[in-house]
Amino acid sequence: MAAWRPEPSPSLYPFLLAAKETLGRSYPGISTKDLCSPRYAPAVEAGVKRAHCAVRGRSILPSVEVGMEEADKILSFVVAFTLIRATSSHRAYWAFASAESELASYRLRQELRSPGGHRRFVLVCQASGLDMEHVEVRLGSTFFSFLSTLPSVLRVIPASGLTLAQLGLRGGEVYLREGEAIRLARSSIRRLLLQRLAFTEDPRLPNPLLKEVEKLKSHFLSSSSIISPLSPERNPCVRRLLLKLGSGGNLSQFERFAIVTFLLEEGWEVEAIADLFRRSPDYDERITKYQVAHISGTHAARRYRPPGCRKMRAHGLCVEGCRLRQRMEDEEDVRT
């Protein structure tokens, strides 16, 4: 049986304040210029792997940290965070925040299967800025395990893939099943990391680590890297458009609209989406940011939704063999 721990482990959730305190006790006064010391080599190596996994759209595996002390596990996260911040790339920020929040949500799911896990889950959520309380409530035929507040949920639900209609909304309170709570927690952690990346000062790194930063940047210069965040099964049409954009192709207004709305639906930030269009022959930073923000609803009351399969097909953008398209055609056959 798993040992009961009253508090979340700082090394499992290195974005917590407790992780910073643990690192400070183990390595007091450590700075970026110290990272080339052999003393920190295992943590730095793990941090470099962590950053490269993130920008390539791969899952960050817990095996990266196997055999490491708690402080070194935390330091590996700090190294990865610092390298990503040094790229000054919104796409790198998004990739890192997504990968780390995915790892955290995996660990939170494991927490819920261990003694005291609900308490630790709640504490991690609260530390990320998401209101959360453990409850055991049945509403109608549905059993709920967690309770949050509507304002808190509204801040993170756009990037979670959930809708309010799926949740147990009662006045200003939102009842959640375990899976829903985990998805909101992942979205909240990603939001927290994106905010920290945006507001952290540019780091001063020693030359060996600056070389790693250049490698991370170079990944986004290849046209194939632009499509890595999207599932080939769910988004074949958008992946093809992104590949066209990545190779410097000139997209129609509708194609650009489709890319922006699909990525907004996936939870991408306005800055990260606008950054993709730097490859366009007619790129204008100010106009692009304004247009993406307008579509997102930032400058207007309306947020635009992604075009459906019919509209994509009407514009000749539907991909043969798309499972979503096949399912829609099957449904049309049933209706007729």
Image: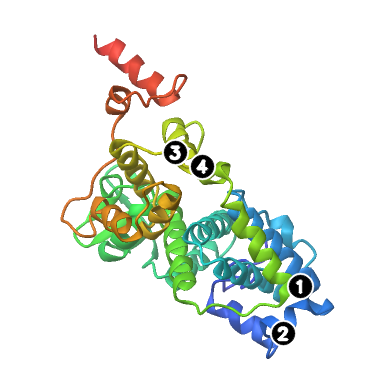
- Image quadrant in which the N terminus is located: bottom right
- Image quadrant in which the C terminus is located: top left
Few, some or many residues within 10 Å of mark 2 (<14, 14–19, 20+): few
- Which label lies toward us, 2 or 4? 4
Q: Could one spot residue 52 in this view of the protein? A: yes
Q: Amino acid at mark 2?
A: Ser
Q: Secondary structure at mark 3?
A: loop
Q: On the rendered structure, is 40 left or right of 31? A: right
Q: Amino acid at mark 4?
A: Ile
- Which label lies toward us, 3 or 4? 3
Q: Please provide percent x and percent y for residue 330.
A: 35, 15
Which residue position is annotated with label 2?
26
User: Does the CB distance between marks 1 and 2 fall below 8 Å?
Assistant: yes
User: Does the CB distance between marks 2 and 3 fall below 8 Å?
Assistant: no
- Which label lies toward us, 2 or 3? 3
Real-space Cα separation, disc 2 to disc 4, in angstroms:
40 Å
Q: Could one spot residue 1 in this view of the protein? A: no
Q: Secondary structure at mark 2?
A: helix
The tag earlier along the polypeptide, 1 or 4, is: 1
Which residue position is annotated with label 1?
69
- Indicate which disc residue 227 carries: 4
